[in-house]
Image (spheres, rainbow, N blue to C red):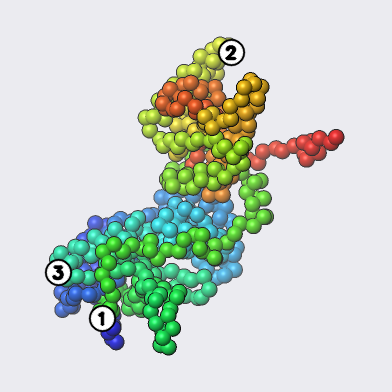
């Protein structure tokens, strides 16, 4: 093990613009400083210049805040003022929401889990060292991939074998001040497992795992700085490590089930969720909904109670596209025929058809819920068969309720539609569903742009029947 580790910044790196070739720029700066890369060097690059080169820049003036962003703004602004921190605009909050899968804490700070799995303040969005007043930088979509591209390019150009870290600075839960952390790696394992080694007294280490890339990122941060130092790339030389071409940042992320510091939702907040859920029948935000988030909600829905624990529900997740358009067109033909038989006017039929078409086609996701009759018990008597079918319907309805609550918890808006009940055959034919599937409900899902009004609810005395 080397007793000396050298850390030095690469000077003369210009302000980075979208499309800039970072490896070439870094090599040019090294040449200006009469420096070279050596075998075993670890190059630490600030996330900001990587994001800039990728065009991961947004203008807050172009962001339309959702109702959720305004709600969070109203909640955290007084707390932020009290703490003496900068006020986050609804536009910035919306940008944070767009980069997040879950808001973990909305107090004087906004702590979220990003799409990458990072738990941090403000989704890693940065307003410093960007340029314009309203410009912000977003984290790279895949920092591991970007680190690998830059590393391989530098190795090809120099013939030197190096490791590369893309770094940022995060705050910490129990201490004041930001420290350097790694967002992406290439060539070096994020952790150094010391279990099995001996301490000074010969005792075997049983739980010591060193977060070596965060240690390295923090050491580089001492040179990079946070203000006008202008040193977004740092070389660490003399640190002994084993090269790992399969390294990924995911290796250092703690699994959620092992995270002791995630706040549990208490009874009061769950009651609030039950009361705040609304059927959303307005236009959805253009914010992209991650399909993985939809699947997380379906995963929660499968924990609903069901008769015989049969779990008769089957979910079909439909993105926007030709298949959904064909389905709604075929369903609308049936709707039109039904309304004609009901004696409705042509104007009424037209408005009804357009409303149905708009609702089911404009939503980011349309989810079809089916009852799988194959899982139902078989009986010899017709009445028992009917009752078994009803139990299946009840079970599917329970799962649907769980699904709507899951959407609410995850910040999504949704509405439950029963239209599939009237067009079972059309849906099954269009989607080529199994014979045992019985379409039961549609759910339109997306991010809201306005708040649904609070519905009237009957008094408790009106729904409890006394014997």
- Mark 2 vs mark 3: in front: 3
Q: With 285 as the anchor, is 21 left or right in this view?
A: left
Q: Position of residue 48 (x, y in %)?
A: 33, 64
Q: For this rendering, which residue is in front, 415 or 164?
A: 164
Q: CA distance from mark 2 to mark 1?
A: 83 Å
Q: How far apart in space, not on screen, are marks 1 and 3 (Cα)?
A: 18 Å
Q: Is residue 401 left or right of residue 112?
A: right
Residue 224, how many percent across, how many down?
33, 75
The location of residue 208, given as percent across then percent down, is 43, 75
Q: Is the Cβ of the residue at disc 2 closer than 8 Å to that at disc 3? A: no
**Residue of label 2:** 342
At x 64% / y 57%, what residue is drawn? 266
Q: How many marks?
A: 3
Tag 2's secondary structure? loop
Q: Pointer 2 and pointer 1: residues touching (CB < 8 Å)?
A: no
Of the residues under marks 2 and 3, which one precedes in the sequence?
3
Foreground of the two, 78 or 190: 190
* Residue 190 found in image quarter: bottom left
CA neighbours of label 2 inside 10 A, class few (<14), some (14 to 19), many (20+): few
Q: Which residue is mark 3?
A: 158
200 is higher (above) or lower (below) than 425: below
Q: Residue at x 66, y 46 (%)?
A: 275
Kind of element beneath mark 1 = loop
Question: How busy is the neighbourhood of tag 1: few (under 14 within 10 Å), some, or many (20 plus)?
Answer: some
Look at mark 1 in the image and give the residue it sits on: 238
């Amino acid at each position: 093990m080397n007793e000396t580790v050298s850390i030095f910044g690469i000077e003369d790196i210009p302000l980075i613009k979208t499309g800039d070739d970072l490896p070439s720029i870094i090599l040019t700066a090294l040449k200006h400083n009469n420096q070279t890369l050596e075998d075993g060097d670890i190059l630490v690059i600030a996330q900001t210049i990587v994001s800039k080169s990728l065009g991961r820049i947004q203008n807050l003036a172009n962001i339309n805040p959702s109702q959720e962003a305004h709600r969070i703004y109203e909640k955290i602004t007084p707390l932020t003022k009290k703490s003496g921190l900068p006020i986050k605009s609804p536009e910035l909050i919306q940008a944070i929401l767009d980069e997040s899968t879950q808001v973990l804490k909305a107090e004087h700070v906004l702590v979220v889990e990003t799409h990458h799995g990072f738990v941090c303040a403000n989704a890693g969005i940065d307003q410093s060292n960007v340029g314009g007043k309203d410009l912000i930088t977003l984290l790279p979509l895949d920092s591991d991939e970007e680190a690998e591209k830059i590393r391989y390019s530098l190795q090809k150009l120099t013939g030197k074998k190096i490791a590369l870290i893309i770094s940022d600075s995060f705050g910490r839960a129990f201490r004041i001040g930001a420290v350097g952390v790694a967002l992406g790696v290439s060539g070096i394992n994020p952790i150094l497992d010391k279990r099995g080694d001996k301490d000074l007294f010969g005792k075997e280490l049983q739980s010591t795992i060193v977060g070596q890339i965060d240690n390295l990122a923090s050491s580089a941060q001492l040179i990079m700085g946070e203000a006008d130092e202008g040193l977004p790339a740092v070389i660490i030389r003399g640190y002994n490590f084993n090269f790992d071409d399969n390294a990924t940042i995911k290796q250092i992320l703690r699994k959620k089930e092992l995270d002791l510091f995630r706040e549990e939702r208490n009874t009061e907040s769950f009651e609030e969720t039950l009361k705040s859920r609304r059927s959303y029948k307005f236009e959805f935000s253009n914010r992209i909904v991650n399909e993985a988030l939809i699947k997380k909600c379906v995963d929660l829905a499968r924990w609903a109670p069901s008769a015989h624990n049969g779990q008769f529900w089957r979910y079909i997740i439909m993105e926007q596209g030709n298949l959904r358009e064909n389905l709604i067109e075929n369903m609308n033909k049936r709707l039109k025929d039904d309304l004609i038989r009901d004696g409705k006017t042509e104007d009424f039929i037209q408005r009804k058809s357009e409303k149905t078409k708009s609702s089911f086609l404009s939503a980011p996701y349309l989810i079809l819920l089916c009852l799988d009759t194959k899982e139902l018990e078989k009986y010899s008597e017709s009445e028992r068969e009917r009752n078994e079918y009803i139990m299946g319907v009840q079970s599917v309805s329970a799962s649907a309720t769980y699904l709507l609550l899951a959407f609410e918890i995850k910040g999504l808006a949704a509405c439950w539609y029963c239209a599939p009940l009237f067009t079972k055959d059309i849906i099954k034919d269009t989607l080529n569903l199994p014979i045992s599937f019985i379409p039961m409900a549609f759910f339109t899902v997306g991010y809201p742009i306005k708040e649904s009004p609070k519905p009237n609810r009957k008094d408790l005395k009106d729904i409890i029947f006394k014997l």
